[in-house]
Image: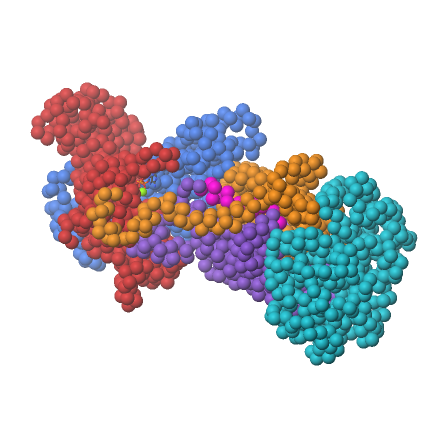
Chain colours: A orange, B cyan, C purple, D blue, E red
Amino acid sequence: MASSAAVPTDVKRPSLLRLIRENKVAQGLTLISPANVYLVLFMVVPLILVGILSFLSRGEYGQVLFQFNLSNYTRLLDPIYGRILLYSLGVGVATTVLSLLIGYPLAYYIARAPARQRSLLLFLVLVPFWTNFIIRIYAWIMILRAGGFLDTVVQWLHISDQPLHLLYTPTAVMIGMVYEFLPFMILPLFTSLEKIENAVLEAAADLGAPPYRVFLRVTLPLSIPGMIAGTILVFIPAMGMFVIPDLMGGAKTILIGNVIRNQFLTARDWPFGAAASMILMVLTMVFTFYYARRAGLSEELVV
Amino acid sequence: TPAAAPTEAPPAPAPTEPPQPATTSAGGPAPTSPASAEPTLAKPTSTELNLYGWSDYVPQQLLDDFSAEYGIKVNYDTYSSNEEMLAKLQAGASGYDLVIPSDYTVTAMLNQDLLQPIDLAQIPNFKNLDPRFTNKGYDPGNKYTIPYQWGTTALAYDKTKVPFEPKSWADLWDPKFKGRLVMLDDEREVTGMALQTLGLDKNSTDPAQLDQAKQKMVELKPNIVLFNSDDPETSLITGETWAGLVYNGNAALARQQDPDIEYICPKEGCGLWFDNLAVPKSAPHADAAMAFMNFMLEPKESILITQEFPYSNPNKEALEYLKANDPSTYESYTAFSATNPPDDFLARAVEVKDVGAATTLYDQLWTDFKGQ
Amino acid sequence: MSEKKPPVWLRIYTFLVYLYIYIPIIILVIFSFNNQKLNITWKGFTTQWYAVLFHDRLVQLATRNTLIIALVSTAIATIIGTLAALAMQRYRFPGYDASEALMYIPIVIPEVVMGISLLVFFVLLNMKLGLVTITLSHIAFNIPFVALVVRARLHGYDNSIDEAAMDLGANEMTTFWRVTLPTIMPGILAGAMLALTLSLDDYVITYFTAGPGSTTLPLRVFSMVRFMVTPEVNALSTIWVLIVFVILLIGQLARNRRA
Amino acid sequence: MQSEFAVELRDVVKKFITPEGNELIAVDHVNIQIRNGEFFSMLGSSGCGKTTSLRMIAGFEWPTEGDIYIEGEPQGHRPPFLRPVNTVFQSYALFQHMTVFQNVAFGLEMEHATKSEIKSRVGRALEMVRLSSMDRRRPSQLSGGQQQRVALARALVKTPDVLLLDEPLGALDLKLRKEMQLELKALQQQVGITFIYVTHDQEEALTMSDRIAVMSYGRVLQVGPAVEIYERPTSRFVADFIGESNFFDGTVKAVNQKKAVVTIPAWKQDLQATLVADAAAGDAVVVSVRPEKIQISEQPKTNDNCLEGVVFNSTYIGSDTHLFLDVGGQQVKAWEQNRVSSLDPHLFYRKDQKLWLTFPAENVLVLPKE
Amino acid sequence: MQSEFAVELRDVVKKFITPEGNELIAVDHVNIQIRNGEFFSMLGSSGCGKTTSLRMIAGFEWPTEGDIYIEGEPQGHRPPFLRPVNTVFQSYALFQHMTVFQNVAFGLEMEHATKSEIKSRVGRALEMVRLSSMDRRRPSQLSGGQQQRVALARALVKTPDVLLLDEPLGALDLKLRKEMQLELKALQQQVGITFIYVTHDQEEALTMSDRIAVMSYGRVLQVGPAVEIYERPTSRFVADFIGESNFFDGTVKAVNQKKAVVTIPAWKQDLQATLVADAAAGDAVVVSVRPEKIQISEQPKTNDNCLEGVVFNSTYIGSDTHLFLDVGGQQVKAWEQNRVSSLDPHLFYRKDQKLWLTFPAENVLVLPKE
Ligand SMILES: Nc1ncnc2c1ncn2[C@@H]1O[C@H](COP(=O)(O)OP(=O)(O)OP(=O)(O)O)[C@@H](O)[C@H]1O
Ligand SMILES: Nc1ncnc2c1ncn2[C@@H]1O[C@H](COP(=O)(O)OP(=O)(O)OP(=O)(O)O)[C@@H](O)[C@H]1O
Ligand SMILES: [Mg+2]
Ligand SMILES: [Mg+2]
């Protein structure tokens, strides 16, 4: 850097500016620090509080006693929580798979539509997603409940004159869950499908592959990153979701989300709730990281 | 006034009703003269009141009247379960002047020293209350709370649908009810019901008894199609359910839509609850809160609550006022057991108490029961 | 392939999925004109609920709060998130992976936990709960989503256009404002849209961080439907959908113009 | 092979509807017959319909009118995967998610070839393109030239009757492109498959092809061997598009079999010329002379077509020197090969130097005026 | 302009740390002096450090050692926006969100020029590149060649002391590239700005440059005018990289001033040759002969360096024919210009035809063995 001293204009500039200008690392840190500082302050610190909380214990009247112990974690060893966790996993998986099955053809259709139509079609997928969550759910309840819209249609079509009694069944829960998470699956799928050039598909056909084999051997594999991103965005929240199962499923079962919520809102056993959420977080963290690493999550999430 | 416009039933022309109290209370001091004559009754200096209450539980008209009378702006923020409110105050949330905890929640709050005492001398209208509903176990002498509304949790059923007329909780275990019952999504009420069915104390903390209750509940599970604490009446109206454990309010609403709905306290007993106004320790405008409690007890103000919400009113003067000014509403109020339970009904009603450490047991039981 | 349209079954399927997506919205709108308080079955046409809505002071207050929170938090989150995206996409620095991990936290923690932990946190700082605390929380969970989307857009950004700007005499600041920013604007807008959506729709976290007088629309709507689903909420959401349509439509047109 | 022709386009028309909604005739009544085993090039400027024609042969597009015959069979709307032709795409269109081996094997798997057969045939194909060592790599780990070879192997391994190549070397840089040209040509002679080669690089076409079809605006202007196309273009467009040429307006003065005398008004002088298309005395025509055919001398020559010119620019490009002269107000370019070491100054042409140009009569072509 | 040199690289070294963490010397003790107003090209194969050198002059990178002088001033770490040079990027790097006009105006706004001044200067710049009519379009609405011209105008409008161009024509197709080459050259002569032109296309460099620097692996091998580089390369690499050449191993037999006699063992024969670098009798050397310098005759010539060869391949490329002959077991390529109409068959060389090749002594260069 000795030579630089020979350059008057540089000497004049404030040294800090020069430091930043010449140091890529400094630039990177400058840009990232606002986010890091903010997230550490408003995410990490609060979570540390929860972490500490998970080692304390519940007072008789639901207040938090500063008695350090591990009982909250040992209590989680009770097989019932294992069962609940598995059940929640099941709901998460079912939702993810169904959204994938329902969303994939749509994403494919949009990705292959003429460029002019694409953004419109995509935007149509997003609109309902902008209304209020709870209202969407109640709309579905109105549709599914006995004598509701669906029954009316069914009777009008003379398919059956008996109410279907769909509401408060697992089917209803799935209808609601998939509805809620579909956009999160379609968006990433769309972006990865859109990236596939027509020429590659033509090449496959040219090499003797009939359409279905073109799909299985080329389209599908090339859209895996999108599937992974979509899976993360759907599976995680679906696993923690409990409002839909409660409202549309009749609250007859209990999910990990309920367990955590109940600790804070009915049993008022915050330490135990904290412990449960710590475990859940660690699990999802591991899951996400494993997957996110395998598919540049961000690259697939173009809205 | 639009706030009341949606009220469809009771037949009383509720939309036109509210203005009268509004106008009268404008010239309020006259009728309340005995109270306001009290030299000790201080006019609040605060200009704001942060009311933190159940959603849709305090009539907009009442708030407007209060503001008109005292020139105090009321912020009405809502919660939808005692525990939501408790969670926030327990965490130390401050700024709220008035909350509406239920009986057992009062106990919990007192134990955590979250409430501040109230000076009954500041609340002359306390005398309007029916003694049956004051001086309760959770707050002897009403040092901290003023009754707001009360009600029951009991058995509602559609008499045209049920296979037979249920007389006791035990009847619900009948296979004929398979997939036809609705239950409050509330561990204390449901477990309590099971305990009562077994002839045990609704607030039992004995692990063995609770375990029995659990077994009993598990047996009932096939008959339950829905747990819902918010609008169980809807499923009764649509016929998705025939019977179930609900709040009196739910039963009343169901009755408005469907006259075939009955509401009884089975022979094993049923539930009883009280909602009260209380002032958090951290309240910045306690004086306004006190003023509101007194104002709310004015008969023509208190009755607004009954006209808009289908619960029971502990204010006997208010009911007298209703009888005088709106007989038809009074009629339907007294006629139905949900709003005006007969004495034998009340006699069997047991209120839920805070069970302290045992709460964990109930939660564990509930988790096991649902996690089956 | 120009004249080869997608197979019939796929077109039908697509139509059905769109139907699935829109039926609830249609029902919602229809029942906003239902003349029955316990909005269960169709009882006849009325527009009274819109009148009710327009006089509902709590809803108006809530709308105001919601908009303030959503706009402010979106704006700030978009700025911070965009900077982060730039850092992540263009630079390597110590603690890179840690920063990335940090970004995933809000995506993976259960909302209740996030809400409670923020509540406890604010109380310990003894901050007055209200619009400020809600906004702070929304910014927190919005930053990662903005960063995620903007990053996707930055992927494949041609750095030489920045160099070109400097070469033509623009210093770092001018280069950023005049060249970098406009170029990645579509990505930033997309990110902002996502943030806005999440902020407008959030219930749990908002509930715990809310204080006196800071009720938002989701909170209000939730308590409205909690005990009785009156058509008023349908009317509310009908208007909501209308506004959203207009907003998105404008965004859409803007995007088309750019393209 | 029952048919004499590997591929035949009979009166093929292809219309597109442009996004703006108006009709666009991309291929306009094209008739081409491509013989078995020949290296056939389609040459034309961007947008003239080369790719479209190729895509119709491959089956990605269907003719609006007319039909395409492969080995004598009409193809109609037969889908690509049923046609005995394979394509090498300009963008290569490799499968990024497969290794080099899997890419090449793909086509054979579609034929349900046995594992062992696939192994050996893919092996041979990769050898042919000298990539045996890289069969485990992914396309992203290969250089442009290597990816190009994979695309080639992938198509060749199917041993199609016809191989279609759409500007396969377009993406490579000059030096590599020249290399690959020779390789491709050698490969074609080795495997004996019919190649249909699309390019807009005329030098490429000349170097590699047995026959060339020159296209413009969807029409075929001339079909013939490289030499014919270059030495005896039948239209000004072809003469101009293939290689470079000087053009002068003139009128035919006299015609005698294939010879003609043309007057160039600009010079008030006659040129002895050769007829390519027929023309009659009095016709207005264009005369075309290739720059390298022009003989430069410092002294006037006695023979015909010798004119005086003045150098106004001379560009040294190594093997040749490009001279730009002014001949009676017309610009004329002439290429001189630098046979002897151009270092000794007297060999350089100076600006404003007077020189004599001779246009050999057999290289002065008479073309119809357009 | 106080200094004789527009740009000077003094002993410049640039090291990079590769992602794998090992050190890479991209530019290795380079010394170059570029005169005011000259068209200077940097030529070299991919990865040899051309772009890096250019980026250091522009100020996007800083030398690890040595320094860069512009108009005699050391630049040190001065940022790009303070240097009197401008760059035309290979990727054009146009601002997609601005119109053509705004793109060109950008640089002037940075100088805080007045509205009216900007308007007139941009107008002139666009005229210069013949885009005046398109000033309202966006880059995405322009063809490659047009975008290229915008990039050019954008840099030129700043009237820099030095213009840096990094393979500006790399992305254009052959015909357009040739056109733009002449245009650029003309433009440079018109505006008289110093051009530093990076390319890996030797023909391009030869056509356009006043002087060329040939680079390889970060080092400069030879700097000189096109003719010198082409006709008198001082190393085998240069001879091979610039144009094409035949190379034969041999040993110096005798030296006499600039003349030498070299024995080619393969042929057991001596060649009269010219010395480029000095060599002494007995040295093992490489002899280089350009294909177009070789004279072909059907009868043996009496003069020196005349050898017999057998044609094994002849490729017609229009203006020339490329002959590949076998001379005593060694492959020799010779370019013949098709002066006379190649249509008459006897003018074609047949495979296996015997021919006589003469290597003119002044074009047989003796290069050091590497
Ligand atoms: N799918 C399509 N829809 C509309 N027009 C098209 C379509 N495909 C090609 N065209 C038009 O048809 C004409 C011929 O296109 P084609 O690709 O065959 O040209 P080309 O000779 O291959 O040009 P290039 O050398 O640039 O590849 C062009 O004007 C093009 O715009
Ligand atoms: N930022 C960098 N970090 C590490 N190595 C680099 C960097 N930039 C260039 N290099 C290396 O320096 C060497 C020279 O690169 P440079 O771009 O100058 O080559 P070039 O002559 O321009 O090649 P080309 O003709 O392909 O553009 C290459 O090996 C390249 O990989
Ligand atoms: Mg093409
Ligand atoms: Mg380069």
Which residue lies at the image location 63% right of the left edge and 45% below the top edge? A65
Of residues B85 and C157, the one nearer the viewer is B85
| Percent of width and height locating residue B107 | 72, 53
| Percent of width and height locating residue A100 | 62, 45
- Residue C97 among those drawn in magenta: yes
Secondary structure mostly seen in magenta is helix
- Quadrant position of residue B332: bottom right
Q: Quadrant of the C terminus of chain D?
A: bottom left
| Percent of width and height locating residue A135 | 66, 58
**Residue found at the very far left of the displayed protein:** E257
Q: Is residue D164 above or below residue D134?
A: below
| Percent of width and height locating residue B212 | 82, 41
**Residue found at the very far front of the displayed protein:** B39
Of residues A263 and C192, the one nearer the viewer is A263
Q: Is residue D187 above or below residue A143?
A: above
| Residue C102 visible in the current orientation | yes
Which residue lies at the image location 22% right of the left edge and 24% below the top edge? E249
- Residue D369 among those drawn in magenta: no
Q: Is residue B48 above or below residue E3?
A: below
- Quadrant position of residue B58: bottom right
- Quadrant position of residue B51: bottom right
Left or right, residue C125 beside residue B283: left
Which residue lies at the image location 54% right of the left edge and 37% below the top edge? A290
Q: How many marks?
A: 0
Left or right, residue E366 beside residue C96: left
Q: Which residues are magenta?
A: C96-112
Which residue lies at the image location 60% right of the left edge and 48% below the top edge? C113
| Residue D18 visible in the current orientation | no
